[in-house]
Image: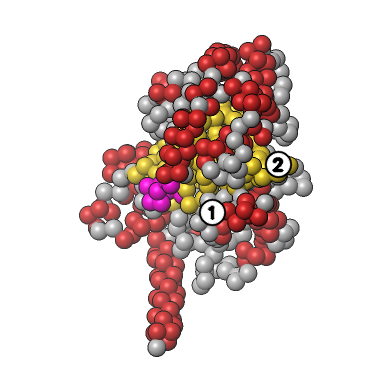
Amino acid sequence: MVAVESENKRAVSQADTTLAKKARVDETLATSVIDARACFHAGLLDEADSLAAVFASAMPFSHCCITPFCDETLLQGVRQEMLERLHFTQKETDIFKYHQSGDLANLDGLPEDEKRQLPSLQKLRDAIYSQEFRDFVSRVTGCGPLSGSRTDMSTNRFKQRDHLLLHDDVIGDRRVSYIIYLPDPKINDGRGWEPRDGGHLELYPRESDESWAPAINPTRRLPPRWNQIVLFTVLPGQSHHSVEEVAGIDKERLSIQGWFHFPQPGEPGYEPDQMKRLWTSGAVSTLSQIEAKRQRESGLVGEDFADYSQPIDDTMGLSDEDRALLSKYINPDYLREKIVSQVAEKFAEDSHIQLAAFLNSETAAVLESSLKQVDRLDGMDGIDIPPHGTGERGRWHAFGPPVIRRYMRLDGPAMANAAEGDTHEEIVSDAELQATELLAALRNDLFASGAYARWLSSITTLALSGCRGMVRRFRPGLDYTLGTPDGTTTTTLDTVLCLVDDPEQWADGVVGGYQCYIDGGNEDEASNDGSVYRASEEDGALLTTPAAWNTLSVVMREPGVVKFVKYVSASAPGSRWDVSFEYQVLASDESEEQ
C-alpha cells in the first residue's frame, strides 16, 4: 500500500513538473517581446562573429571578456537595486567565503510590491535569457541551443577576505557560465580596480595534455571591470577557475553570476542525450571523474605509509636512546612520566589534545627567527597578496592539484607551472637554509622515528604500525586544502606541529589557517572536481584547531572523517608552517595478534 501510494505521488509530481516547465517556457516567450537589444551596449549583438574568433583562440580555455556590455543607465539601476534592496547572506565553506543574494530566477514569484522595487534587475534578467541574447551567446561560444526557461543567476558581494577557490562549475546541465561585473565605477578615484585589490578571476590550464587535473598556478587573471561580462563554456576537466581573495580595504567586488543551461524538455533544440553526446565525444566527463576519484583516494598526504619493523604500542616504554633523541627537539616537560600520564588521561577522554610549547626553547627560538625572516623577504606582511610562484625555490615546491589542495612542500616534486607574470627569483636566503634544515630534521629524525612513535603510543595508548608525513608552508593569499575523502578505511592518528607568527591574530579563525575535521559523508556527494562542498553553519565541524605557535595537535581520526586547512587570508601576519604526519592505528584485535 505504501509503495503504490508513493508511485501515485511520483506520477503526480512528474506531471506537475512537466506543466511547470511548459509554463516557464510560455512565460519566457511572453517576456521575449521586451526590446532586448536596447538593454545591451549599442551594436553588441551584431559583433558575435568577431567575438567568436576571440573566444575560440583564448587561453587557457575558451572564454571572452566583453566591455562595455550593458546599457549604462540600466546597469547603474541594477547596481543601485542590488545595494539598496537585496539581502545578502554570508556563506562560508572549505572552498569559499562570500556574500550572496537569493536566486534571481525567483523574481517572478515575489509579491507585486516587491517586484516593483527591482525593475532594473528584472529587466536585465529577462534580457539575458531572451532569445536574442541566447542566440548571441550560442554564436560566440559555439555551444548550440540554450534554455530560455531555466534561469539561473544570483548576485554576489565579495568583501575583504572573501574568496572562491578553484572549481569547474560542472553541476547538473550547466552549459555556459557568465559573470557580470558591477564594482564601483569611481573606485580608486576613477582609476578602476587595481591589482593589489585582489578579486581577479583566475583561469587555470590543464596540468598536461594527458591529464584532466588543473595546473597549480593560473595563467590568466582577469580584473573585475565595470560593465564587463565574462563568458566561458562549462566543461569537466577544463573550465577550472577561481576568484582571488579581495584584499582591498573597503573594496567590494560586486557581480552577477549565472549560467545558461542545456535546453529543457519541450524547448527547441532539446535532445534526451545532449549532455552525454557532448561530453563523451572525447571521454571528457568520464576521464575527469576518474581523475577526480584518483585525486580523492590519494589523500592529502599521498604517499604510502612506511611500516615499522614491528607494531609499536604503549607497553614498550621509552629507552635511554629514545629519550636522548626526543630531548634534542621536544620540551623536556613532555618526557616526564607525570606529564605523560596526564596527557594520556586527557586524550583518553577526548581522543584529541593540543600540546603548547612542544619544541624545546632552543629549537623553537631558531625556527621563530628564521621563519619570520623568510616571510618578510617574501613580502608576506598581511597587506598585499603575494604573486603566484612566491617561495617556489630551492627545496620548496608548490604541491597540488589545486582542485583539492595547494601549499608549499619541503622536498616535494617540482610540479608547478609558471604563473602569469611570474618573475620570482631563485635566491635562497641564509634564514631559509637554516629553517629548511631544521624542519627537515624534525621530519626525518623526530616525526618519522620509532622513538617518537613510542612516545605517541604512550600518550594515546594506541598501537601504531606505520607513518607518513611532510613539512608544509601555507602562504597567505594562496594556499589551502579542501575537505576531500581520501579513501582511508582504518583509524588514523594525526599529529601536526603548527608554527605561526603572532598567534593571537590567528586565534579567532578570521584569517583562516585553522585545521577543521568534518563528516565526509558519502563519497558520491563529491563534485566532479574532487571537492566536497560543505557549509559549516549547517553541518557543523567535529573539531577545529586554530593555527598557533609551537603547538602539537594530536587527533584520532575515524574512517569517513575528513580534514582541511582553511584558506590562509592575505591579511594573515605570515605563513602557516607545519610538520604534518599520519600514523596507522592497529585495531585492538590486530595488536593482540601481533
Q: Position of residue 286 (x, y in %)?
A: 68, 59
Q: Residue furthest left?
A: 113
Please tell me whether residue 355 is drawn above or below residue 329 in the rendered image: below
Residue in front for this viewpoint, 345 or 142 = 345
Range covered by the magenta-colored residues: 534-545
Q: Amino acid at mark 2?
A: Tyr
- What amino acid is labelled 1 in the image? Gly
Asked if residue 587 lies left or right of residue 110, the reply is right
Determine the residue positioned at 42% across, 39% down: 346
Where is the N terminus found, in terms of image quarters? bottom left
Residue topped by disc 1: 560
Q: Is residue 538 magenta?
A: yes
- Measure how far apart labels 2 and 1 are at the Cα level: 25 Å
What residue would you read off at disc 2? Answer: 308
> Does the rendering let one see residue 417?
no
Residue 453 falls in image quadrant: top right
